[in-house]
Image (spheres, rainbow, N blue to C red):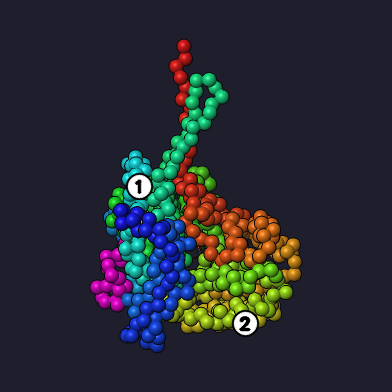
């Protein structure tokens, strides 16, 4: 704990360091340069929320040295957990069955996990409920301490967590490393939040009576996490669970269970009591497990990140028992480049927003509206940058973009591309499916206003450039969506910045930036992108109930 604090305060006092170039004369990866690639993203302080400067040092090779005893080549092989967790104990499926976890870069199986069922889930909920009776009585300082230790453990194990993310999600090493920083930032933020669950005193209009509110943990929470941020998404759900004294059953995504499980293991090493975080891994039984997690009366809160379709179904399930819900669902983010934009900033911001995680984030720009006066200049500058990307296994040096998660995502990108091409769009960069789940980062010009891309999020590396001619027109187009998670625009006119920021029907606005995600802000959407916030102090409130207490005085 003291190490984390010392590091934070040292970092706050010193100027931000830039990335380093490391010269390596014996790079073992075939075809890679001996000058190990420089990180292009610069310092990652915007991610941590803690101003901890994390070196973007690249190692001689990030390709893990695997063996039969250490199949994922971790420095600490005990961080590879291949079972569920109930009450701190290893859990199997009731029928003993398992499912395979695959490396999306190769399609090869990297391990298995139990295919747990509804009964297993019910058991996990009971344990979480029993544990809640004691965990809710721990002090804020106890929980602050657990989270600070966990924060330090995440940073201490960053290489292994990065490896797990690359193995099961496929994103590039730099992206995965940044995600570990992002996840640690959430845990650090909620360590502070554990100490800030303040109630109020409220002046009372009745003589002799005093009014107070206190904040209490809501109870057992079902946390359903997606595969696109295997560390980040669980961190921003389990952080407030621990901070507030709740307990949880976590349903891991079938694609990426190992990073979730490693983080739960680190939480246990940080002292979080057994039974606070329980993990159900499942693939075949997703429907019934999802139903149990959203209908069991012992569960008081559900937090889900994923598609709008599944979110709506879970919300319906939770209605009968009126559970509190946080739904962080799909987006279809507009990104607008006005004629008065600073073009290099607009290009950099578009790349940051569109291509992070190979386009598989809920806040990725999806509809890129460019003013006709600068359309050609912007399009060619963006295409030039995108042509320089390198697609491949996230472990390879120099790879900027990894594969998509599975063939369904590849098919969706291809379908959106074909549809736009059939309506007159033109490829300026990329445009081809590569081997396996790899897809070239693509820039498309002359995209019509009505096509599949504008109707739903692509969730892939396809930048669709649509021409517009007036602010009024583009605001109408941007708001013409059932969803509203994030929206971006680029302009150097201050009046326009306020006007457009206020007009966009979204929960998150990036004005002159494509990087909006931080642990300290309330992340969440409007319309069919769901409700509830993650991160910020609002992300703590989601796990608390407010109780009002009136205290009268002696009546004579
Ligand atoms: N908001 C996000 O961060 C996010 C994340 C993943 C996918 N998506 C969107 O969803 C689309 C499809 O991707 P997907 O198939 O992985 O999304 P999905 O909504 O089906 O899956 C997201 C998560 O929900 C779980 N899930 C699925 N069905 C469930 C059920 N019946 N009960 C409980 N949990 C269930 C999945 O296992 C996964 O962990 C993507 O193209 C993208 O548009 C959004
Ligand atoms: O994809 C969903 C979350 C993305 C983010 O936190 O930036």
Residue 230 can be seen, yes or no:
no
- Quarter of the image for residue 174 reads bottom left
Look at 39% across and 60% down and name the residue there: 11
Q: Residues within 10 Å of mark 1 (few under 14, many from 20)?
A: many
Q: Residues within 10 Å of mark 2 (few under 14, many from 20)?
A: some
In the figure, is residue 274 to the left or right of 356?
A: left
Look at 51% across and 44% down and name the residue there: 322
Secondary structure state at the residue bearing disc 1? helix
Magenta highlight range? 65-86
Q: Is residue 66 magenta?
A: yes
Residue 153 drawn at (x, y percent): 32, 59
Q: Is residue 51 magenta?
A: no
In the figure, is residue 130 to the left or right of 301?
A: left
Q: Is mark 2 within 8 Å of ligand 1?
A: no
In the rendered image, the residue lying farthest to the front is 14
Tell me the chief SS of the magenta region.
loop
Residue 141 can be seen, yes or no:
yes
Residue marked by disc 1: 143
Q: Is mark 1 within 8 Å of ligand 2?
A: no
Q: CA distance from mark 1 to mark 2?
A: 52 Å
Of residues 104 and 354, the one drawn nearer to the viewer in this rendering: 354
Numbered tag placed on residue 338 in the rendering:
none
Secondary structure state at the residue bearing disc 2? strand
Residue marked by disc 2: 428
The answer to whether residue 548 is above or below residue 97 is above
């Amino acid at each position: 704990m003291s190490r984390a604090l010392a590091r934070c305060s040292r970092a706050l006092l010193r100027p931000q360091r830039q990335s380093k170039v490391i010269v390596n004369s014996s790079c073992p990866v075939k075809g890679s340069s001996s000058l190990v690639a420089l990180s292009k993203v610069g310092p990652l302080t915007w991610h941590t929320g803690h101003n901890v400067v994390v070196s973007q040092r690249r190692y001689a090779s990030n390709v893990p040295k695997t063996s039969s005893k250490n199949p994922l080549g971790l420095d600490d092989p005990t961080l590879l957990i291949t079972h569920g967790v109930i009450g701190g104990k290893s859990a199997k499926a009731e029928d003993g069955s398992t499912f395979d976890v695959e490396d999306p870069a190769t399609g090869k199986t990297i391990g298995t996990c139990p295919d747990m069922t509804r009964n297993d889930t019910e058991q996990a909920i009971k344990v979480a409920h029993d544990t809640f009776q004691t965990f809710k009585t721990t002090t804020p300082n106890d929980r602050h301490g657990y989270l600070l230790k966990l924060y330090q453990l995440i940073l201490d194990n960053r290489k292994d967590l990065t490896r797990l993310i690359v193995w099961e999600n496929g994103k590039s090493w730099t992206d995965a490393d940044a995600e570990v920083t992002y996840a640690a930032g959430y845990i650090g933020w909620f360590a502070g939040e554990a100490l800030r669950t303040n109630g109020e005193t409220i002046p009372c209009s009745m003589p002799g009576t005093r009014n107070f509110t206190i904040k209490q943990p809501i109870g057992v929470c079902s946390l359903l996490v997606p595969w696109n941020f295997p560390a980040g998404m669980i961190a921003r759900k389990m952080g407030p669970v621990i901070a507030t004294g709740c307990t949880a059953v976590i349903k891991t995504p079938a694609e990426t269970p190992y990073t979730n499980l490693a983080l739960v293991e680190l939480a246990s090493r940080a002292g979080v009591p057994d039974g606070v975080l329980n993990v159900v891994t499942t693939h075949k039984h997703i429907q019934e497990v999802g139903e149990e997690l959203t209908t069991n009366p012992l569960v008081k809160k559900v937090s889900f990140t994923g598609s709008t379709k599944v979110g709506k179904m879970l919300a319906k399930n939770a209605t009968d028992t009126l559970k509190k819900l946080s739904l962080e669902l799909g987006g279809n983010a507009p990104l607008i480049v006005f004629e008065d934009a600073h073009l290099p900033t607009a290009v950099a911001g578009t790349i940051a927003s569109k291509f992070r995680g190979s386009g598989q984030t809920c806040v990725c720009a999806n509809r890129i509206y460019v003013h006709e006066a600068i359309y050609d200049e912007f399009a060619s500058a963006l295409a030039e940058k995108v042509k320089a990307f390198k697609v491949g296994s996230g472990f390879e040096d120099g790879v900027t973009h990894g594969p998509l998660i599975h063939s369904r995502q590849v098919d969706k990108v291809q379908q959106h591309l074909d549809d736009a091409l059939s309506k007159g769009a033109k490829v300026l960069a990329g445009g081809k499916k590569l081997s396996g789940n790899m897809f070239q980062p693509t820039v498309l010009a002359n995209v019509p206003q009505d096509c599949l891309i504008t109707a739903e999020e692509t969730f892939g590396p396809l930048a669709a450039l649509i021409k517009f001619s007036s602010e009024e027109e583009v605001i109408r187009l941007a708001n013409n969506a059932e969803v509203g998670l994030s929206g971006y625009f680029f302009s150097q006119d201050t009046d326009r910045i306020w006007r457009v920021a206020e007009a966009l029907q979204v929960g998150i606005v990036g004005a002159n930036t494509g990087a909006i995600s931080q642990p300290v802000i309330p992340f969440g959407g409007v319309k069919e992108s769901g409700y509830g916030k993650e991160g910020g102090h609002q992300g703590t409130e989601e796990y608390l109930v407010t109780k009002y207490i009136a205290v009268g005085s002696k009546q004579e």
